[in-house]
Amino acid sequence: MRNSRRKGQLRAPVAEAMKAYAEDGALAFHTPGHKQGLGAHRLLRELVTEQGLREEVSLMEELDDLHAPGTCIREAQELAAALYGADAAFFMVNGTTGAIHAMLMAALQPGDTVLLPRNAHRSMVGGVILVGAHPMFLPPEIDDELGIAMGLSPEVVERAVREHPEAKALAMVSPTYYGVASDLRRIAEILHAHDMLLLVDEAHGAHLKFSGELPVQAMDAGADMAAQSTHKLLGSMTQSSLLLVREGRVQPERVQNAASLLQTTSPNQLLLASLDIARLQMAEAGERLVGRAVRLAEELREAVNGIGGLSSFGRERMTTPGAVALDVTKVTVSVRGIGVSGAEAEQLLRHAYGIQCELADAYNVLFLLSYADTQREIGRLRDVLEDMAEKHRKKGIFAMRCRMPGIPLAVKSPREAFFASSMAVPFEESVGRVAAEQVMFYPPGIPVLCPGEEITGECVEYVREMLGLGIRAVGPRDVKLDRIRVME
Ligand SMILES: Cc1ncc(COP(=O)(O)O)c(C=O)c1O
């Protein structure tokens, strides 16, 4: 980035405007009701700080308008776009879920076909319901030994494009929660040759831009839009995300319209400022900070692979057709070899050792390293893993009995199923009925059932086994799945 442009990056226009408003000292006859902290309860003051509350205002002229940005929000969004090499960036205050909904609403129309790898996050299915699009599910590559989805292969995309020339777009996750990145460059070429869009759920990729050792970020690989969770791996507050846009096949005005339709008219200024400051932090020191996380993660991975019974895959595992690169800051530790499940290991780590992992699945626990970590945290985690492997080892290797079932038959579109009358029936008696809700285990983050799909015996068996392992079901109203909602 040129020096003059970098200089602009060292400002935080939204945060500056908030501070200026607070310092101006105008007597507040406006929302929020706590009136810049004057009426705030002590607990809220402790939580947000006096200064934070003084600046927690919105809709003032000088604070700009998220729905028609013209001053500080516009400037902050332009700085974000420039840093990430996009043509436009949108601040999102309903997480990457909101960003994904806006992305699909901007790119698709009711009745459009969208190619959707089955390991889509539920926000993708939610977006499809909102738009009224028809998903054509594509199978991601699965690594049976690790028990996780590894990415989407260009060959599967090529076939899908041939079989569904009517499709408008492919909407896919990359990298996955476990850091596995697909060949986005190749996939973008295939799609663009057929006039289709590449829409990327890059929830786990907000930091990729800042290290040459990480997978290439979606915008640089040719994606038309990418939704990033700034709050997951960088320094903005939970719930704040970025939607990045490449102009051409997508019109930024449509994205603005979709974002405005879906977002609150009272965006929390602290969330907006935190996006602005997270961008500033990366402009200041992104390469150094993310580079440190990469080094620490590699060190941790090496240490884990030296502990008997534990293992952590690295770049050498990127051999399945879908996987081309790994975000090494995601350290997935397989605990199968010490005879426990990922869920058991998560509980042990939390309650016997005071360590909380990011997630656990049947075989693995995932540790997420970010720019905030230092040698101290890594050292402690390494010691704990050594101790756990020694003291809590059980006989044998942990293995699941049944595999993830195939994609069930879609009898109705997700939107039809969502709006249809539904009833709850005992799950064990639901085989042959049409699901009205989504059921998945997160991880592996692949829906067992989507709304509109026919429930099979295989699905019921798999769900029972996952619940038995202590893995929480995501999606159904009854998370224990004694009953499931089906179409009437
Ligand atoms: C792959 C993926 N996409 C999208 C989301 C949604 O992000 P958010 O929680 O910011 O709405 C998540 C959240 O975990 C995710 O893992």
Image: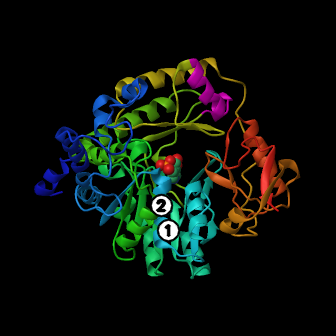
Q: Which residues are magenta?
A: 335-352
Is the residue marked by circle 1 packed among few (<14), some (14-19), or many (20+) residues within 10 Å? many
Give the secondary structure at mark 2. helix
Is the residue marked by circle 2 packed among few (<14), some (14-19), or many (20+) residues within 10 Å? some
Q: Which residue is mark 1?
A: 105
Residue 100 visible in the shown view: yes
* Depth order, front residue of 175/125: 125
Percent position of residue 93, x then y: 42, 51
Task: Identify residue type, mark 2.
Answer: Leu
Up the image or down, 150 lies above or below 386; here it is below
Percent position of residue 341, x then y: 67, 33
* Depth order, front residue of 17/426: 17
Q: Which residue is mark 2?
A: 262
Side of 94 where 348 appears, left or right: right
Percent position of residue 159, x then y: 59, 75
- Mark 1 and mark 2 lie on one chain; the one further toward the N terminus is 1
Quarter of the image containing the N terminus? bottom left
Q: Quadrant of residue 125?
A: bottom right
Labelled pair 1, 2 in contact (Cβ < 8 Å): yes
Residue 176 visible in the shown view: no
Give the secondary structure at mark 1. helix
The residue located at (52%, 29%) in the rendering is: 356
